[in-house]
Amino acid sequence: MGFHTLDDFDLHGRKVLLRVDINSPVDERTLALEDGSKILSSVPTIREIVDRGGKVVVLAHQGRPGDYDFIPLNEHANYLSRYLGRKVRYVDDIFGGHALKAIDAMAEGECVLMKNVRYFGEEQASRSPEEHARSDLVKILSPKFDIYVNDAFASSHRSHASLVGFTAVMPSAAGRLLEKEIKTLSEVFQSPSRPSTYIFGGKKLSDALSAIEKLVTKDSVDHILIAGLAGYGFLWCLGKAVGAGTEDLIRKDVAEGDVERAKRLWTDHADKLILPSDAAVDEAGERREYAIGSLPEAASVLDIGEDTIARFVDAVMHSKTIFLSGPPGVFEREKFARGTEALYAAIVESGAFSVIGGGHSSAAANKLGLMDKFSYCSTGGGALERFMLGKSMPVIEALKESAKRF
């Protein structure tokens, strides 16, 4: 793949600086973590390093400065301790005296999690690896370590200090999660078993259009199913009435040129695109379904209807590769989870190689108890979209350059 992995290094007795992405949902009222699945995804790499006799210091972020979820990582350390079955010590410092003392005192097989790296003011500056290498973060920490490992796929589309700076000055490798994400997503988007079906649910229309434009011209792509706000937004672009409540949300998101992009896609590739034919709305607390063109004037669409479900399920059941980004409806509300439940169940039953991506997709899988039934659940959001579009990924490029240097 052009970069080093853990297989290329002897870790015994080595000090390893590991960057992970354990940025997790936070309850706005209590500031407690709501879900630990992102944290769990980093465990295989940490476990392998400590089991192979390495000493691992973990750098990670949570939220952005100024946002409610910009909190310390002490609770993340508790989650890691529980998942690993060994103590992960939290150090409320990044590269000051307290942090350096903790690093020097580490024993073989020990794991330490440092303070939220975004407390470092230059962390989020968009600079080259060489520019970031001149930051205090990299200059002070890099001499303390033998190897740098990046396992933060969900942040791999960013050129931040802790993500790319160390690759310029020391031997570097991809962690097991990053390695697996690249291998799996390459298979899904570059060489899928056919028939292949790609599903876009609760996404913004502009984002969905970019992905669809990239995929629809590929011979290896057989079907693209579009639901959620993206699907009804697509119909709106084609001149279909989808209810004033729905249209208000669409207008907030639609970018200049999106209407023409959707029309052009439909004209050129209608054979591959499957759009909703009906919709479910809330009427006095009850689920009511209407065909597209018959929706009440003020309606707000909350789910796909039974006819759309049947058409989507049929495409899924005949597929050998399935990718899903975003559930098709408001699954958090029981009466409007039917589309999500039916589609997820069909994906599992199909026996296809199945990949889901995005936080809402995983949340729905968790709620339905199906997370372990899919072939793979990607941790990426923005990174997944960028990879899907074939755009350059700063972290991956930095690891490749590091492999040439070291």
Image: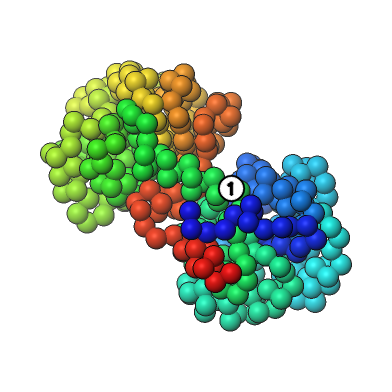
User: Secondary structure beneath disc 1?
Assistant: helix
Residue 353, horizontal then vertical, whole percent: 45, 30
Q: Nearer the viewer, residue 284 or 231?
A: 231
Q: Quadrant of the C terminus?
A: bottom right
Q: Nearer the viewer, residue 190 or 91?
A: 190
In this figure, which residue is indicated by the disc labeled 1? Answer: 177
Kind of residue at disc 1: Leu
x 36%, y 39%: residue: 191
- The vertical placement of 105 against 302, above or below, is below
Residue situated furthest left in the rendering? 267
Tell whether 82 sits left or right of 116.
Answer: right
- The vertical placement of 168 against 19, above or below, is below
The colour scheme applied to this rendered structure is rainbow
Residue 259, horizontal then vertical, whole percent: 19, 47
Residue 267, horizontal then vertical, whole percent: 13, 39
Image quadrant in which you'd find residue 317: top left
Mark 1 Cα shell of 10 Å, populated few (<14), some (14-19), many (≥20): many
x 41%, y 35%: residue: 324
Residue 228 in view, yes or no:
no
Tell whether 99 sits left or right of 159.
Answer: right
Q: Nearer the viewer, residue 11 or 260?
A: 11
x 49%, y 63%: residue: 400
x 42%, y 40%: residue: 187
Image quadrant in which you'd find residue 367: top right
Tell whether 287 sits left or right of 238.
Answer: right
- The vertical placement of 227 against 63, above or below, is above
